[in-house]
Image (spheres, rainbow, N blue to C red):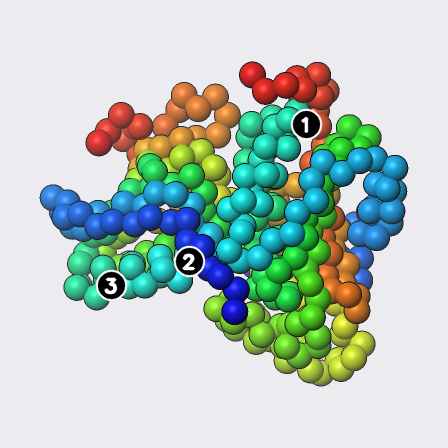
Amino acid sequence: MLAWLASMSSDERRPVPAGPGDGAVLAGEQAYAMAGAVPLLLDQDFDSGTLYALRAAAQAHAIEAGLAEDRTDDLVISVHELAANAVRHGAGRGRLRMWKRAGALHFQVEDGGSRATAGQAACGGEEAGPEAGRENAKAADEGPESGGNVADHWPFLPGHGLWLVRLVSDQITVSSGPDGTRATVVFTLSPEDSSASSPD
Amino acid sequence: MLAIVSTLKASVAAGESGPVVMLSGEADLASAGQLSDLLRAQLAGGVQRLMVDLSGLRFAGSASVRALLLAGKTLRERGGVLILARPQRAVARVLELMGVDELLVVQGGASRGSGSEAAETGPGPNEV
């Protein structure tokens, strides 16, 4: 456990606006722009009281899209953790969009952004442990330039939301801007998944 | 403030070797505080062994799992143990991802894949 703790902490401090994914990954906005050509499977607002409905909707659409059962569990976990992040560290609410494109299921979680300002976003409430404290101090040190650091908005802590999503998804891209933080996640559909387009 | 809808149901029964907390529904952000309070109240009595029956729980987010981990830590520090019993598949997955099985005792319940195997540490899904 301590090994991943160490490996994570270097990542979360790296001021890369495109997030924890590798450089080849599309930024959230690009990914969504490309998705403009395909219909959205799901477009749903949420807040802390409606996460259960969000999970149910995401699960239903993932199964309908042909994602395997185990992978659907992972997708639901991912949707939940990112939405929970948006609730906790964003404006207290957010929006989920999901679409299918190029043999993969994509979804995007946006927070409302109003609380995602430097200095405040790193105060993780119940989340705030030593790690969060360091993030906060770091944000204060770096001043306005730290605004591009995803970790300032949604903490990338072991065992927490973003960290879990990175474990189970095929790709995650996180970007932060004046409008808030946006995570785009990809679950590839295996050939077997795609052919089994109806639930058994 | 936002309306909080709790989808978690919890009850406590007296087991042979300590209290048994039965959870059902879904444990997420809205109920993580409720779960923490419940576990803390159980631990306040100085119990050494607390069982949490997860068989009715359909979903658990990381915030709720951290509440369980925290309770487990408190028990461990006093030489006790927290046992998580019979998690459903989706809950077992979160426990696995968060490495909970390294820190707490997980008994029975679903495992990933074929679903025919019980969790390694458990006596099996048929055990009640």
Q: Amino acid at mark 2?
A: Ala
Q: Which residue is mark 1?
A: A65
Q: Is residue B85 above or below residue B62?
A: above
Local packing at callout 1 (Cα closer than 10 Å; few below 14, some 14-19, many 20+) is many
Q: Which residue is mark 2?
A: B32
Label 1 marks a residue whose chain is A
Check contact, mark 3 vs mark 1: CB within 8 A.
no
Comes first in the chain, label 2 or label 3: 2
Spatial separation of the CA atoms under disc 2 and disc 3: 14 Å
Percent x, y of residue A154: 64, 63
Q: Is residue B99 visible?
A: no
Local packing at callout 2 (Cα closer than 10 Å; few below 14, some 14-19, many 20+) is many
For the residue labelled by badge 2, is the local secondary structure a helix, a strand or a loop?
A: helix
Residue at position x 17%, y 58% from top?
Answer: B47
Q: Is residue A194 above or below residue B26?
A: above
Q: Is residue B96 above or below residue A66?
A: below
Between A175 and A91, the residue placed more toward the observer is A91
Q: Is residue A144 left or right of residue B107?
A: right
Label 2 marks a residue whose chain is B
Q: Say which mark, if any, is on residue B41.
A: 3
Q: Is residue A174 left or right of residue B27?
A: right
Q: Amino acid at mark 3?
A: Ala
Q: Amino acid at mark 1?
A: Ala
Quarter of the rendering containing residue A66: top right
Residue at position x 45%, y 55% from top?
Answer: B5
